[in-house]
Image: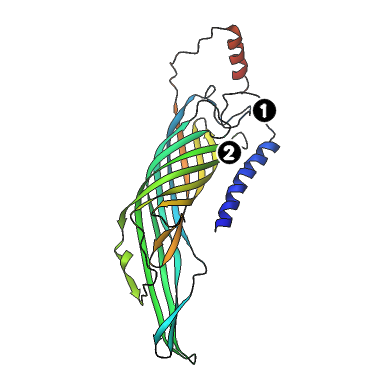
Amino acid sequence: MKKWILLLLVFSFTLGAQAQKRGKYKYKNKRNEHFSKRMVDPIYSVSQSTCKPWGLHFSLGATYTFTDLNPDEFSRSAGVDTTTTFKHDPRGRLGYYFDIGLLHIFKKRNPVVHYWDWALGLKHYAGAEDLKGSTTTSSGQEVGTLDGTGKWDNGYAFARINIHNVIQISKWNFIDNSFGWNVDYQIYGYKHNNQYSGDHITDNERFQGKLITGLHYRLGFGIKLKEGWFLEPWVEIPLFTAYEWNKGKPVIQWWSSWYMPFAVGVKLAILWKKDPNACPPVFTNPSDQDKSDQFQQQK
């Protein structure tokens, strides 16, 4: 799993860099063009856009928990000349995701980061665990079986903050890379969270605490719908969990298994309109006026 996460991060940055290198758009050295670095048709420009560099965004999506595809098998003595062999086999399950917040585009262009956003939201993580096993004699004869199942469903209220790098790949599209910090707190859990149906072996059993905080990565593909309106499908994976500490592993522990939460969704971002009655800029130097006129004619 760590290998695939690393490959995803490298691929996202490489793809955007190559797309810009091969792009058919002309470039100009303009300091206040944001998302395209020096593209003539930027996704957003503070000076040219009719929208302010901040606005509202919200996301709807789904969650899923990835699990160990090859769980360990354990054995222990079950009596004279008998041994019980078993394993806890986890399963991922679907949940929901929703957040709403504000985004803030940096007014001065930065070559690395272009905007940041924050959000408050709700999300639901779920999983299940199956116990499978058998009891055999020293001669290999099976004298019993083990079969049990446990499920869990947890809902979290959360806050997050992300810093974004935007790579424009066409007049209407861009790649959005971001790293963020999230703080989640469990606000509800289903009754079956602590109930196991059938056989139950509690070896290595542990339940995650209510508070979770850590680092995550989000990759999005942005679509400019019109000036100031952006639609962005995205995928998010956890990178590191600071609390509840589990050697930094970005997982949730429940029953005797671990689950890595994963989220996909669609974000709609809407920048607020500028005041049409605002005073135009005043130029004290004629050359500044000429430069401004030339800049406005680039579109």
**By what rule are the colours in the image chosen?**
rainbow
Residue beneath the point at 41% across and 56% down: 95
Q: In this view of the protein, which residue sits in the foreground, 134 or 228?
A: 134
Task: For the C terminus, give its image quadrant.
Answer: top right
Q: Which of 123 and 272 is in front in this view?
A: 123
Q: Name the residue under label 2.
A: 174
Which label's residue is closer to the chain start, 2 or 1?
A: 1
> Tag on residue 164?
none
Front-lying residue, 176 or 229: 176
In the foreground, 248 or 173? 248
What amino acid type should be assigned to the residue bearing mark 1?
Tyr
From the viewer's perspective, is residue 182 above or below residue 1?
above
Mark 2 nearby-residue class (10 Å; few <14, some 14–19, many ≥20): many
The residue most toward the bottom is 139
Above or below, comparing residue 186 to residue 227 in the picture: below
The secondary structure type at the circle numbered 1 is loop
How many numbered badges does the structure rendering display?
Answer: 2
Residue 39 is situated, as x and y percent measured from the top left of the image, at 63, 29
Q: Is residue 38 left or right of residue 278?
A: right
Residue 62 percent across, percent down from the top left = 44, 53
At numbered mark 2, what does the secondary structure look like: helix, strand or loop?
strand
Measured Cα–Cα span from mark 2 to mark 1: 16 Å
Residue 27, numbered circle: 1
Q: Residue at x 47, y 48 (%)?
A: 216
The answer to whether 296 appears left or right of 202 in the picture is: right
Query: Could you tell me which quadrant the N terminus lies in?
Result: bottom right
- Estimate how packed mark 1 is, as few (under 14), some (14 to 19) or many (20 or more) residues with alpha carbons within 10 Å: few
On screen, residue 134 above or below 122? below
Q: Which amino acid does label 2 sit on?
A: Phe
Q: Which residue is drawn at 44% across and 63% down?
A: 258
